[in-house]
């Protein structure tokens, strides 16, 4: 079982994703020896809502029954993905629930009411556009950035486990993006990228799907000069003073990597998931305030361990060029033109 602080961070992340972005969420593990219960405070303007939350593991009926037995008085259950039976069981006992899959049903006497279902995703044939895991995206990023796709090389560059690396490489080989000219086995076996352009195109589609599903934080603040100068003079030093990983992507990153567009209206940032879940601290570091529209900064959790491994330019951490390329393509219009310029200048997606 995860330690209480680690599980508390995960619980907070799930709640933050389920609640509107304007709500502040604080999660404190209870010192009860179980490591399953948490005191939660939700601030909505001047209103404050407090409740006892509990971790129900995978979210099966036996998991929620165990939680209610071990944590008497639990008001909101949190899990990976509640089954329909488990949800009905909790609702019948007046216990709210939230899970990582995007479902939520909370109705507190204090007036906090949250009801949420994840947006339906249209089914597509598995052969046309299979969903890639975060590990598969990271491995593709490494291969598209010039790392020879052996288990040993990719494991070293990405920081993934050997099993996750081998699984992702095998998946990309099954998709036909990697090939092994000689039937050699082992961590140093000689795969190579079969068609860099095909892999890049598939990667961009998968990265765009991942970005669409990713939570985001919208922030407004005043510029010091312009967006890039504000990033250089204020935001980057503030983020660099922490131990958190971060990187700029999108149009601002393209200006730093391969100038093409001159007008940056919004900064697109990635920060590590732990910092992203602590919205009060994050907004303070950015020097702004959370908004629902009119943002000049958009923040998302780092999508892969590779995303923050791009160059550092004048103190600014820039996302991996291939990730910047994918984010630009996903925006379309002039940003997509900047993506093609970036590809030409930086050799994005070139085979090693």
Image (cartoon, helix red, strand yellow):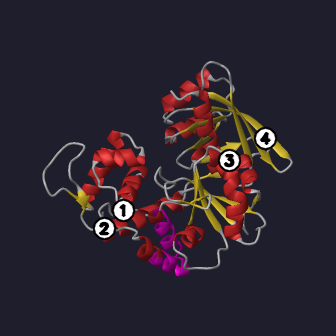
Q: Callout 2: few (<14), some (14-19), or many (20+) C-alpha neighbours within 10 Å?
A: some
- Mark positioned earlier in the residue sequence (3 or 1): 1
- Mark positioned earlier in the residue sequence (4 or 1): 4
Find numbered disc 3 in the image and state the secondary structure of the residue it sits on.
loop
Q: Is residue 11 left or right of residue 135?
A: right
- What residue is rendered at 55% in x and 81% in y? 334
Q: Position of residue 332 (x, y in %)?
A: 52, 77
Q: Is residue 149 left or right of residue 111?
A: left
Magenta-colored segment: predominant secondary structure: helix
Q: Which residue is mark 1?
A: 144
Whole-angstrom CA distance, mark 3 to mark 2, is: 38 Å
Whole-angstrom CA distance, mark 1 to mark 2, is: 7 Å
Residue 335 in magenta? yes
Along the line of sight, the residue nearer the viewer: 67 or 46: 46
- What residue is rendered at 38% in x and 40% in y? 161
Q: Residue furthest top?
A: 33
Q: Which residue is mark 4?
A: 49
Range of residues picked out in magenta: 323-341
- Mark positioned earlier in the residue sequence (3 or 4): 4
Q: Position of residue 145 (x, y in %)?
A: 38, 61
Task: Tell whether label 1 touches label 3 (CB within 8 Å).
Answer: no
Q: Is residue 346 left or right of residue 99?
A: left
Q: Callout 3: few (<14), some (14-19), or many (20+) C-alpha neighbours within 10 Å?
A: few
Q: Which residue is mark 2?
A: 196
Task: Tell whether label 2 touches label 1 (CB within 8 Å).
Answer: yes
Q: Which residue is mark 3?
A: 241
Image mark for residue 107: none
Does residue 175 appear in the picture of this structure? yes
Q: Callout 1: few (<14), some (14-19), or many (20+) C-alpha neighbours within 10 Å?
A: many
Residue 44 in magenta? no
């Amino acid at each position: 079982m995860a330690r209480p602080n680690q599980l508390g961070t995960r619980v907070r992340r799930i709640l933050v994703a389920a609640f509107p972005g304007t709500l502040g969420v604080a999660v404190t593990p209870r010192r009860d020896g179980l490591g399953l219960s948490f005191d939660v405070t939700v601030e909505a303007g001047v209103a404050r809502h407090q409740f006892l939350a509990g971790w129900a593991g995978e979210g099966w009926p036996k998991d929620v029954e165990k939680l209610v037995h071990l944590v008497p008085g639990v008001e909101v259950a949190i899990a990976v993905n509640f089954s329909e039976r488990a949800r009905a069981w909790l609702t019948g006992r007046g216990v709210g629930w939230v899970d990582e899959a995007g479902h939520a049903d909370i109705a507190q006497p204090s007036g906090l009411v949250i009801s949420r279902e994840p947006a339906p995703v249209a089914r597509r044939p598995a052969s046309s556009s299979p969903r890639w895991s975060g590990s598969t995206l990271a491995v593709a990023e490494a291969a598209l950035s010039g790392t020879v796709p052996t288990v040993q090389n990719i494991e070293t560059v990405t920081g993934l486990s050997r099993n996750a690396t081998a699984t992702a490489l095998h998946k990309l080989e099954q998709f036909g993006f990697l090939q092994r000219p000689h039937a050699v086995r082992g961590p140093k076996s000689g795969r190579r990228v079969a068609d860099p352009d095909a892999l890049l195109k598939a990667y961009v589609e998968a990265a765009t799907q991942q970005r669409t599903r990713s939570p985001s934080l919208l922030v407004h603040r005043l510029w010091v000069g312009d967006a890039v100068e504000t990033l250089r003079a204020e935001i980057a030093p503030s983020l660099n003073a922490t131990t958190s990983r971060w990187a700029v992507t999108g149009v601002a990153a393209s200006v730093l990597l391969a100038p093409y567009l001159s007008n940056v209206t919004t900064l697109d940032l990635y920060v590590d998931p732990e910092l992203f879940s602590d919205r009060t601290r994050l907004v303070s570091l950015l020097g702004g305030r959370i908004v629902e529209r009119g943002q000049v900064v958009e923040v998302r959790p780092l999508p892969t361990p590779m995303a923050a491994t791009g160059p550092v330019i004048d103190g600014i951490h820039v996302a991996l060029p291939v990730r910047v390329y994918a984010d630009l393509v996903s925006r379309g219009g002039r940003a997509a033109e900047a993506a093609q310029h970036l590809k030409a200048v930086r050799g994005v997606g070139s085979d090693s």
